[in-house]
Image (cartoon, coloured by chain):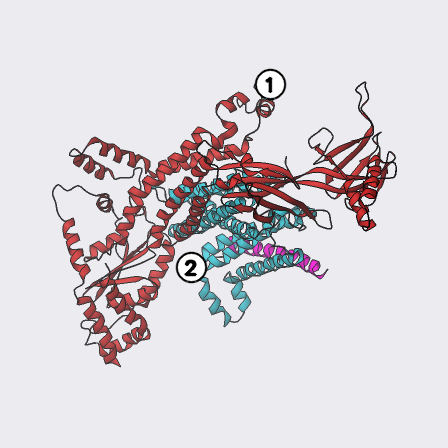
Amino acid sequence: MAFAHRGILQQIHNQTQRPITLDRRLVRCLAKGKQTGKKKLTLTEKLRSNNAAPHLDMFEAPKPQSDDSGEPSTSGSGLPDRGLVAAVGSARNSNIVKVTWRRLLKELSSLPRAIAIMALIAGLSGLGTIIPQNKPLEYYIANYPAEGPHKVLGFLSYDVITALQLDHIYSADYFYLSMALLAASLTACTYTRQWPAVKVAQRWRFLTQPSSLTRQGRTEVLPNARICDLGALLLRRGYQVFLRGDSLYAFKGLAGKLGPIGVHAALLLCLLGTSWSGFGSLKGAVMCPEGQDFQVSSFLHPGSPLATMPEAASNVMHVNRFLIDYRPDGSVAQFYSDLSLTDPRDGSELLRKTISVNDPFRYKGVTMYQTDWSLSAVTLRVLGQDAPLARAAEAAAAAASTGEDTPAAAAAAAERTAFNLPMASLEGRPGVAGRLWATFLPLGKAAPDGSAPRGISILARDPQSVVFYDASGQFVGVRRPGSGKPITVEGLQLVVEDVVGATGLEIKSDPGVPVVYAGFGGLMVTTLVSYLSHSQVWALQQGSNLFVSGRTNRAKLEFETELDAILDQVPELRPAASEAVEGAEAETGGGMSRVAGTNASSNSAAGEVTAAASME
Amino acid sequence: MLLNKLENFLQNASFLTLFLTTVFYWIYAAFYVETNVKTKKIAFDTINQPFFLLELAKNIILPKYFIAISNILLALLLLVRWEKSGHFPLSNLYESLMFLSWCSTFLFLIYSTSFTLIVDKILGSIIAPSALFMNAFASFSLPKEMQVSAPLVPALQSNWLMMHVTVMIISYATLIMGSLLAISFLILNILLNRSFITNQPNSMFKNILLNLDSLSYRIIGLGFPFLTIGILSGAVWANEAWGSYWSWDPKETWALLTWLVFAIYLHSRLTKGWQGKKPAIIASLGFLVVWFCYLGVNLIGEGLHSYGFLN
């Protein structure tokens, strides 16, 4: 059994000794870096040269790090000053445009400046919730007077508000400018800082000196330990492990480094989408009674001259029915509108759908939402022999019926005698609370002296019930539409057949929505991914001693605990045994049993290294 | 009828357990001498010892069990309300406060595995009373009419209700917890600088501060994606319901403000020289902003989210 394990260990040993293509590239890369002389430093190299880690003593308990070493330098400016000097120095050879461009990038990608822009947007947004927005001028004159004891804060009067555009902060110039600055800052930061940092993080950095290890972070030394044991343990914890000779490099959570770039990109996508919406969208609202049509394009108003009317807007929308579903306690359960979109050229129906709140009507880029309703008319029927309409109906019935069913004919005649009285809204009038519609049925001609005619007042708050008042304003009764029960008012017998409702639709055509949704989705995913911490572990085997160093960018305490747990698990070999791998039969039996227990992972360790070797 | 009785019982029981938890944690914070042993080990060690309960109590396991019990009780309460009303139990202020209380206790239980004993004491003394406050305010301060679950208005009859409101409340709970940690960091920092507590070794205090700092960063770092998802799902829902994904409604605006404040907090940690105290101040500001976003805006009286009390 020991021989089989030895074979695996030998395999690992052989793998690491085999020349890897990466080796040569790495060697060349490192060699390149050692070149002196006039060489224009790229941003990546400048950032790397500025990665000054704090000097920690070995074997000491972790101290709070005073800076996030390894992250690109984030002090007041984007590029380190040394780098800028180098850039400027070498820029004497290039033109002045490049220098200005770099300067601009440096200013834009400065983190404190970005924080200031965010704070500015936050402050302006908050201000917009305190001062009511988009109200007519009279409102501000009334509530923010220029003189008098009610002057707000001693200086905030309506002229100050209108002058500073505080009545429409969210569409003010300075607000748009702040948003544009934020977008510029995001782009500059991603370009100068985050992208090079990702490139740096992707390189496998094998360290060959214990001193380089101490520069990375907290370093521990394990006497009598083997580097491949550590490698296997790291693999079990989800690290990607690379071995080259006596040097090990492992990392996990690289996505946590890419996440912030994704966040910035998604934010830019959102901002782009909202600008596109601002310029390219059309919207409007319509209140259409049941049974009526409207042409969609007449109610779509462009947000800017750049907005184009969609093709689908040339169609005509017909409202078949509007219905309010009530619960037994009188509250509204849902609003339904049965809509048909027809092509005006040939009258064919393109789409028919019953919409409700949260379930809009969509057709080729035009969307209609159920947002409002009102009452449009009340359908009444007058009963009684002496009613003029009844007489006409009788005559019509007599003329028409020559063997038809009398009830059906009577019903048809009755229908022909029903008439619509359009209703008007009294909402907002003095003495009126809430929504109220009313209509008037006059009982005679208007008097020649111009006084108001006598008539019946009919009121309704919703399609459920209609209230009648007589000519002197006295309450007479309530009727439910469709019940067929007549009411006698001022000598007339009236039946309420129906209340004709009107559906309030919000129509919108917004080409920017897909872009905005893409930005939203990206933002949701990338903010979660950014939560991952990018951890790196380096190890170096010198004789029988194993130097281990590790660093992480986010979950520092958890990383410390995890690293402690891993190091605790690394088996300690007998001093004589660790000299030569083959000599430590008995001990490696014990030590190997641990590795044997993770045979699969050892195999995968070999597999990983091979995979790593064949990568790139 | 049975459900009503059950709901009453659960309401009172959850309040009682949270009250006892608060009392326990405050007693331990004031009097108990801390050790550095991890609580997981203690749980296993005490089972075999005599005076098992006493050992549990001494090693601060007991209050944690109480938090777990109150968490379960609150969950049951919400489930009973779901059964009674037929819709997801997050439609009014009472239910959202209960859910917030549940989230706080749940988060505490999740993160408690990575606490040392000292941090556990500090955190418990803060989280338990805040969960208690939310519970008590919902049960005893809100008028009964507001506690009753009414059928949903048409605008709320959507599957988005579950996702948007749930994620927002979870994010509020996380951010509140993280900011409370930051506030406690600031308070301890001041106490440390003024040497009010002199009989404890300084390095241990620094260790606590380091722990608090790191934990608040981590917890706020978790709450931030949740807040993002909550705001964005709200925007998508608004687009599906009213055709506009952002209408600068006060609630939306203040949610954006909260998002910006915590984005500033997360970014400020990357700035050199801004470790410890300054980000904690920003997080403390964030605490106030979260509360105003959650409750204050609803009371203003305008906009789509208002309850309209203070017109």
Name the element at disc 1: loop
Compared to residue A384, the image places residue A538 above or below, namely: below
User: Nearest the camera: B54 or B83?
Assistant: B83
User: Nearest the camera: B219 or B39?
Assistant: B219
**Dot 1 amino acid type:** Gly
- To which quarter of the image does residue A190 belong? top left
Q: Which mark, by number, is residue A430?
A: none
Mark in front: 1 vs 2: 1
For image coordinates 81% across by 42% down, the residue present is A399
Secondary structure mostly taken by the magenta-highlighted segment of the chain: helix
Judging by the rendered image, the residue that carries numbered circle 2 is B36
Pointer 2 chain: B
Q: Colour of chain B?
A: cyan
**Can the viewer see residue A332 in this picture?**
yes
Q: In the displayed structure, does residue A213 sit left or right of residue A63? A: left
Magenta range: B1-30
CA gap, disc 1 to disc 2? 65 Å
Judging by the rendered image, the residue that carries numbered circle 1 is A148
Compared to residue A466, the image places residue A34 above or below, namely: below
**Dot 2 amino acid type:** Asn
